Image (cartoon, rainbow, N blue to C red):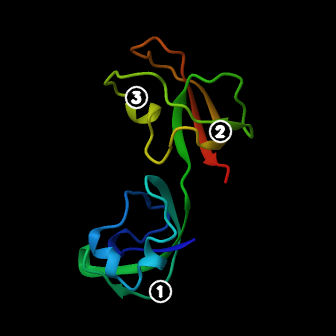
Amino acid sequence: MITLIGKDLAKEGQEFVFLGPADECEKCRFKSSCVGNLEQNRKYVVTGVKDNEQKCPIHAEEIVIPVEVDRAKIDVLTTSKNIFEGSTFTFNAPDCDEACDFHDLCFPDGLIENDKCIVLENNGKHKETCKKGLKLNKLTLGFVI
């Protein structure tokens, strides 16, 4: 899909989480092509950069560039078992309120409760100890749309 992104961020491989449109976007003539295709709280990756520029007061340099984006792959720690590459997976966050070094992998940006995903890589058992004693596996996920 095509969207507009700040000139300083318009690089292939750049990842971002769309947190929603700014108030200024409501009156912008580019709203539908800029934020209209993006889903709030989702993580995207830039896969292609176009050549033209548009003015935009909310981005650095006040310039946006059209880019092609896809949903980004997401690394996650999970307690789910019997997961193999190519299998589908429903994301359910663990019942945990611990502040630890792995929090961002157990509750990754861009992944929402009950998302249907496909396991792109099963990276095996997480080698470090979970504060709650959970046995965690590290996965790289894509989305089933």
Residue 113 in percent (x, y) is at: 52, 38
Question: Which tag, 2 or 3, sits closer to the chain's start?
Answer: 3
Question: The disc labelled 2 sits on which kind of residue?
Answer: Glu
Q: Tag 3, which secondary structure?
A: loop
Give the residue type that dot 1 points to. Answer: Asp
Q: Residue at x 63, y 36 (%)?
A: 90
At horizontal 30% and vertical 67% (from top left) the residue drawn is 22
Residue neighbourhood size for the residue with mark 2, other residues' Cα within 10 Å, grouped as few (<14), some (14–19), many (≥20): some
Camera-nearest residue between 112 and 71? 112
Q: Which numbered marker is on residue 22?
A: none
Asked where in the image residue 20 lies, by quadrant, the reply is bottom left
Give the residue number, with chain letter if any, for mark 2: 121
Name the residue tied to disc 3. Answer: 102
SS label for mark 2: strand
> In terms of sequence position, does the residue under pointer 1 or pointer 3 come before the other?
1
- Relative image position of residue 50 (x, y in whole percent): 50, 82
Quickly name the residue at label 1: 51
Callout 3 amino acid: Phe
